Amino acid sequence: MKRTCLFRSAIFLIVCPLLVLSTIASSGELPVRKPIATIGGGVGALCSEDHDRLWAAVGEDLVLFNVTDPSNIYIESKLHLEGGLNQTVKNGNVLHALGKENKFWTIDIEDPLDPKILKEISLERPPKPICFMGDQGLILDGSKVKVFDFSEPRDPKPIQEFQLDHWPNLIQTGGTLGFTGRDREGIRIYDLSAPGGPEEVGRYPLDRYPGGLVMKDSTAYIVESQMGIHVVDLSNPANPQKVSYIEDRNVMETVQLFQNYLCLPGTKPDLTIYDVSDAHHPTKVAEIDSPAGTLEVLLTDGRIFLPSEGLKVYDFSTPSDPHFLGKYSHPHLPKFVYYRSNIAYVGGDASEIALVDCSEPKDPRVKGFVQLKGTPRCLTGIGKYLYVAGNEFGLEVYDLTEPLKPEKIHHDGRFQKVHAISFGGNLAAAAEWNGEVQIFDIADPSHPNWVTSYDSGSGSPYNAEWLDEYMIVAGGRSGLQLVDVTYPFSPVFKNLIGLEKGVSHITLLGKTAVLTAQQSPAAWFDFSDPIYPKKLGELEETPTSSLSWKDHIVLTGNQGGQVYDFVDPLNPKKVAVFEDGLNSQSAIFGDLLFAPTWWKGLRIFDLEQQE
């Protein structure tokens, strides 16, 4: 008989439980679980500290990278700045940080290992780049240019403000000249030394909006976004003259000049380098390309720092031939994690796995990478074996005997749609997007032996759990399928359990199962009798997945980020919530919870922490 017939004859359980608790309400303030460390989350706002150190924004943190060995970059200190950063500028022992929101900070970095906020200043709008002229700094606040006196960094004072008749998207200084730019209006030039305050003295038109601007002597290099670079003589600011034009439709918003080399970040390639020793005849000398573009670059001490797929470092001692030296972290889109022997193996939207040393969980450090032949879609493990699946390369197994030198020991290219793998005894289930669940014999986990396929009849079975001789498949809209695998080569469908919106995920805690679904309250069941499970109640949240930890259930995914105590399965209690929630790819190892997210990076939580 075909399995579709079994589906039609399946009994949809509407169980009248012994005890139904409809909604578990929480009372009072719950502890908020905050991460003990964060890694990744995007790198930007670069600023050099010294030859061996680099300030950068990572997520909402200002971090100090140690770049002494570019092949082993790690974080030395960290300072949280609410809302994140757009720019950092170092001025002596003070770092000025412009926020993505309506504020900026002055930060004491006399001891770089212990940065301290000196002053937080609120503005009307998110500030645009800060430009310095001695102790004075110019900040763009909407259509106003505000001038601050930073001679006393603990108490910067506004000393001047002038209103513009336009809303510029950039502000820059060069000597006694100031520049603002606005969409399709080009560049306005100001005399900053005028007795009555900044005075407009000239303009330079553009066809598209201006990006960055940099000056050398009296020559300005002006980026015209997605068009090219204007090389302009400003020896007479009232009458700027075009010297030459570099057509480059890859350029975006920023530009840097190092000696006689112009460096232009873009989208593809990431960086283009021009020799402008002869301003009348600029010459392209090098390109740096990688899968993801950037809008920022830092040149210092003969090295290029490029925030692309984390942070990349190049040797710039020969500008016409930059050489890759090393990088920090995986791409800022971490999605999957497995943890063993103090090493977190992290996969994301790139063809590699990052090896993160978490022996000090509050100070994780990237120690290396494993290159893949495609992007992973699933990353998990059993014991010392790491299982990685991807659309391009199928299923691979790595031996983690040497934690920082994973060795690939098995490859099966047949299964390229796997998105979840679970283990139960000597069996493993690999759920595929096409609706099939591949069953493997893992008596020898180093070489999983395919046994058979189970057709779930669903387009996207999310995951499977194991209970005695049963495999329980969360089958999306088709509900929860109970499958007898007493004989793994011939799985037998036994029952179908439905929620209103189907079942996206199942988590077992002993004989208690928590079922989640899109836009449906999480429900929990007593699976003492797997054939006839009893529904015990519903939680107040509508998460899409969950995890088990000791006697607790942690709700994850959409609307997730709560901890329930299930010591009494008939009366679970909410005991804590997570700061900023948790996504569905979170994982628990021991007492550490790893939460990879594209907007926050990889956050690490200590589940035992006391608030």
Image: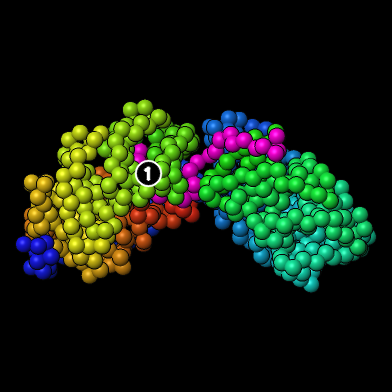
Q: Would residue 362 be found to the left or right of residue 513 on screen?
A: right
Q: Which residue is drawn at 71% across and 66% down?
A: 208
The single residue placed furthest to the top in the displayed view is 402
Q: In this view, does 195 lie above or below 282?
A: below
**Does residue 492 appear to the left or right of 517 in the view shown?**
left
* Image x and y of residue 451, in percent: 16, 44
Q: Which residue is drawn at 26% across and 58% down?
A: 434
Where residue 334 appears, as percent x and y from the top left, is: 44, 48
Q: In this view, does 224 lie above or below 219?
A: below
Residue at position x 8%, y 58% from top?
Answer: 494
Number of numbered tags placed on the structure image: 1
Are there few (<14), some (14-19), or many (20+) residues within 10 Å of tag 1? many
Using the image, determine if residue 296 lies above or below residue 21: above
| Residue 33 horizontal side relative to residue 567, left or right | right
Residue 582: image quadrant is bottom left
Residue 334 among those drawn in magenta: yes
Q: Callout 1, which amino acid?
A: Val
Q: Is mark 1 on a helix, strand or loop?
A: strand
Task: Locate residue 213: give its quadrant.
Answer: bottom right
Q: Residue 148: horizontal and vertical position, in percent?
A: 78, 55
Q: What stretch is highlighted in magenta?
A: 318-339
Between 115 and 599, the one lying in front of the other is 599
Q: In this view, does 563 lie to the left or right of 145?
A: left
- Per the image, the residue denoted by label 1 is 337
Residue 545: x percent and y percent? 30, 56
Visible residue check, residue 119: no
Q: Residue furthest bottom?
A: 165
- Residue drawn at point x = 29 percent, y = 57 percent: 433
